[in-house]
């Protein structure tokens, strides 16, 4: 291995995962001159479902993107976007965010030594994500408005002030996010028949499709899958075919009414055989609980949306054909504990004695 091949990754031993830029360099817009800013993102678990497979009548695997360094899929795109911003000698990076983009931009900017500004809708960001952005040293601008207002402002500010926008409108972000497609196909040894995922701005579904198309073009996979993009019912502009002025859903990460990615799921001139569907907040929260209790996977509400879409389609009998399905769960549950704690009960304290603790245990499992 030449030293150049390990650029930016200090002290890794052979066989160690090197982050998505080094692992998939030939598919990404980087050169030997690009300074690689990485937290060794990617290589996330593809977990065989324990109980949900039976519910949908397909083999189901769950791609756990919450296992990325900042707890969401955004890191795949951010490593490329921040590396390119550094290469371009950007003065500062800016994003609008419902939280995950902000957390990721803040962490990668910290690593790159770049100033980072995150524009967030006041009251619209889960506390875990807000903490991440601030602890990593980003400057937060909280605006009285929706995510879509924040997005508009981020675009204007970056244009007028010649700063780098690191939302998914930044083409480098989507390039990096393509890599989830590569990992799914590599791990399975084939392309799945169906991939379900949550959709907000439709950046990720577009990136996924581009990744699949790239692998298909190179002959690494024999076919292209059907994509199922799932939106929350109160924030479903792509399902309803219209802008939503004040989007509402418990899934704050995908609370948007005006998708920023202009051509959802279309890439390299190909139309996706994709479908969009919507699910209610109740379905989202039930699926979040199901994933946690039955599969051992704690995801944030937005991330449960894709799986909820699969369950709904299966119940309706309208699930697209195919044997093997993958659901991408996009962000970690710890990012939004306030919502999660709304569905469980924190127990009142008992006396610190054997008897008190044993009584609780017996109450549940008996002697
Ligand atoms: N899942 C999670 C956990 C997200 O944070 C997002 C988007 C999506 C899905 C949807 O992805 O927008 O590419 O269709 N979060 C953005 C943010 C809006 O600011 O973190 P998309």
Image (cartoon, rainbow, N blue to C red):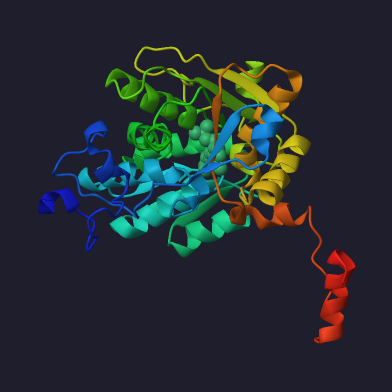
Quarter location, residue 11: bottom left
Which residue sits at x=49%, y=61%? 134
Which residue sits at x=32%, y=46%? 82
Work out whether residue 94 or residue 188 is closer to the camera in this orientation and state it: 188
Residue 359 appearing in the image = yes
Which residue sits at x=25%, y=48%? 86
Horizontal relation, residue 67 to residue 220: left or right: right
Q: How many discs mark residues in the rendered view?
A: 0
Work out whether residue 20 or residue 203 is closer to the camera in this orientation and state it: 20
Work out whether residue 244 or residue 323 is closer to the camera in this orientation and state it: 323
Quarter location, residue 166: top left
Residue 247 appearing in the image = no
The spot of residue 104 in percent (x, y) is: 44, 50
Q: Residue furthest front?
A: 367
Work out whether residue 37 or residue 194 is closer to the camera in this orientation and state it: 194
Q: Residue furthest left?
A: 2
Q: Quadrant of the C terminus?
A: bottom right
The spot of residue 354 in percent (x, y) is: 81, 85
């Amino acid at each position: 291995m030449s030293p150049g091949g390990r650029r930016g990754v200090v002290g890794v031993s052979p066989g160690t995962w090197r982050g998505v830029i080094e692992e998939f360099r030939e598919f990404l817009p980087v050169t030997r001159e690009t300074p690689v800013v990485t937290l060794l993102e990617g290589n996330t678990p593809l977990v065989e479902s324990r109980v949900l497979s039976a519910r949908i009548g397909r083999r189901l695997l769950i791609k756990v993107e919450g296992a990325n360094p900042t707890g969401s899929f955004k890191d795949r795109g951010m490593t490329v976007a921040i590396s390119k911003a550094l290469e371009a000698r950007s003065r500062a990076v800016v994003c609008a965010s419902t939280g995950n983009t902000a957390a990721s931009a803040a962490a990668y900017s910290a690593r790159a030594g770049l100033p980072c500004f995150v524009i967030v809708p006041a009251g619209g960001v889960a506390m875990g994500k807000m903490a991440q952005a601030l602890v990593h040293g980003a400057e937060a601008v909280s605006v009285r408005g929706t995510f879509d207002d924040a997005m508009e402002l981020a675009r204007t500010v970056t244009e007028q002030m010649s700063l780098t926008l690191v939302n998914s409108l930044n083409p480098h972000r989507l390039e990096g996010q393509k890599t989830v497609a590569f990992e799914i196909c590599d791990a399975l040894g084939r392309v799945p028949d169906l991939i379900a995922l949550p959709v907000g701005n439709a950046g990720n579904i577009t990136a996924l499709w581009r990744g699949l198309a790239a692998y298909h073009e190179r002959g690494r996979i024999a076919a292209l899958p059907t994509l199922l993009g799932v939106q929350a019912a109160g924030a479903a502009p792509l399902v309803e075919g219209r802008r939503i002025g004040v989007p509402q859903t418990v899934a704050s990460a995908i609370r948007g009414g005006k998708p920023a990615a202009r051509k959802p799921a279309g890439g390299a001139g190909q139309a996706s055989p994709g479908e969009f569907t919507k699910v209610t907040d109740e379905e989202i929260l039930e699926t979040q609980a199901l994933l946690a209790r039955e599969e051992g996977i704690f995801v944030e509400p937005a991330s449960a949306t894709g799986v909820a879409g699969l369950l709904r389609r299966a119940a309706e009998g309208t699930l697209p054909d195919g044997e093997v399905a993958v659901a991408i769960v996009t962000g970690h549950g710890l990012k939004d504990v306030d919502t999660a704690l709304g569905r469980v009960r924190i127990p009142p304290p008992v006396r610190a004695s054997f008897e008190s603790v044993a009584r609780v245990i017996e109450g549940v499992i008996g002697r």
